[in-house]
Image (spheres, rainbow, N blue to C red):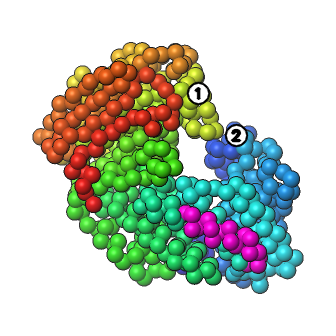
Amino acid sequence: MDRDELLRAIQATEKQYDAGVKLVRTPLTATYHTALKPEQHPFVYALYPSTCYAYDLLRYGGEAYSLRAAEILEVVIAQQDQDASRASYGIWPYFYEESLDEMDRPDWNMADFHGKRLVLILKKYADSLPQSLVNQIREAIYHACQAIMIRNVGPHYTNIAIMGAFVTLVGGELLGDNEIQSYGEQRLKRFHVFTSGIGTFSEYNSPCYSPLAIEELDSIYQESHSTEAVALAEQLLDIAWGMIAKHYHPATREWGGPYSRTYFTLMTEREKHFLGNALNKETTGIKCPEQYHAYFSSNEERYFMEPTLLAAETGYQNYATTYQNDKLSLGSYTIGSMWNQRRNLLAFVDVGGKKVFVQLQFLKDGRDFCSAIFTGVQSRNHVLYGFNLATDNGDWHQDLDVINGKFQAKDLRIRLLLGGDLQELELPTLVEGKRLTTLLGDTQLRIEAILEESDYGSLEVAAERSGDELYLDYVLYAGEEKAFDFHAIQKAVWLFQLSLGNAADQLPEVDVRQEGNSVTATIATKEDQMSITVPAAPGKTNDFYRNNRVQPPQSLLQVK
């Protein structure tokens, strides 16, 4: 961010700044951790955005901005729990209006997020602040580091693992605390060993969090005095940029799937700005390595599969497959819950310069349903996939909203959501039994239900245009609200095949066989065979992850 961009950002935030409270006031959009509801609290005084605002003011400089930053930091630091006897020691609440004790459950990530900004402020701008406040910042960093060390996040939690390493490594250097600094160094080493063992980040291909991971690694690279830490950060940055570059789809100018986590299916302005800056040689800041630039403009065919977990730790593996050409990008996982932040099957299609995305969902009363478990396998532009129902998972979140397979609902459906630039597109759709066909320009999308073994009855097929979206639905239930209990049913498995390509292409025959309590579906593609094997009954999430089997095409296994 250059100086003019920084000033514009400051001026935009200034409109939300309350000089009386000395904090930034924002709309309440958080859904996790807070107990506040938008109906009662449409606007809140947000602590972390206020810390970021103070940091930006100090970056820009000047006496007036430095004074305002100091006032903000005094208020923010006062909200940190600095009592080492408490469970929330070292962290901050989200909002000035809600204490840590009043939250639905405190968010320990706040030690990392606030700690990162305070470390940078102490390292770069201490001379612009009163000594008494500098002492408070040092204390706050110490307490944040203690919280990070107590929590001791594992390397699978990519962005927090890196951010916590930065706070403790560089924070320990600034505080002159060898114990904290050593912890940060060891944490970064563990993350490097773990990530190198997989070959990619376990928080795989996340449009929202991969840029954050790069920013955190770059901060270590730029700010740490440790030669070894800098070398490790450089190697990890190369892994991160390689992951992003391989998934970018130039034809639609979108970040191809699948995604481990995201909040939006289309790229946000922040993500576009991040990539644009990184690829622009004229701008300052974080840069994409030169060897990856060609990926962002080449329409050559890409086809690869890679592991995303350390199987020795989890007891199972989850593979991600991506296929791209000059028209489309199609990505899928082999296993995963249908959490609203996850994209287990995602496509982008170029339709005459307009982009259309195709996103697979499993919905309960219109919301993504965590207790639906996806299993799939992909051969280029063809995916074979199925769903099981988990008896020990959540509704909209696997930890914060656990329902254990028992709930009330009035609607359950499997949906292919089509969105993007649909305003002027016709998207003619044909329904033939359990098969749906939609034309996206000269690209044909076909989906077919090939098996429905369910105590809930037969699937109903529906295609509906709603504003700028098209819904291709397989409805399990729609009617009066009623009780569901996954423990009380014997069968609940649905299998589908999807293809995305030329209108002349036909869906291949699928061989479906039942063996005991499991179902195996096999397709002989043009190249070779692929299959999935899943149980017919509901069960536990980790049992599905460990026991559901996929056989990818042999030719894909050989693709490097």
Q: Nearer the viewer, residue 239 or 545?
A: 545
Residue on which disc 1 sits: 404
Residue that appears at 50% across and 36% down: 542
Secondary structure beneath label 2: loop
What's the residue at 73%, 78% (across, down)? 174
Q: Is residue 23 above or below residue 319?
A: below
Tell me where the magenta segment starts and ends, as one range: 174-191
Residue furthest to the front in view is 312
Kindly check if marks 1 and 2 are in contact, taking CB atoms under 8 A apart as contact: no
- Is 210 rendered above or below residue 374? below
Residue 338, disc: none
Which element is circle 1 on? loop
Where residue 526 sits: x, y (%)? 14, 43
In this rendering, the answer to whether 114 lies above or below 379 is below
Residue at 76% over, 78% down: 176
Residue 400 spot, x, y in % from top left: 64, 38
- Residue 190, visible in the rendered structure: yes
Which amino acid type corresponds to the residue marked 1 in the rendered image?
Asn
Q: 555 or 70, which lies in front?
A: 555
Q: Which residue is mark 2?
A: 37
Mark sitting earlier along the chain (1/2): 2
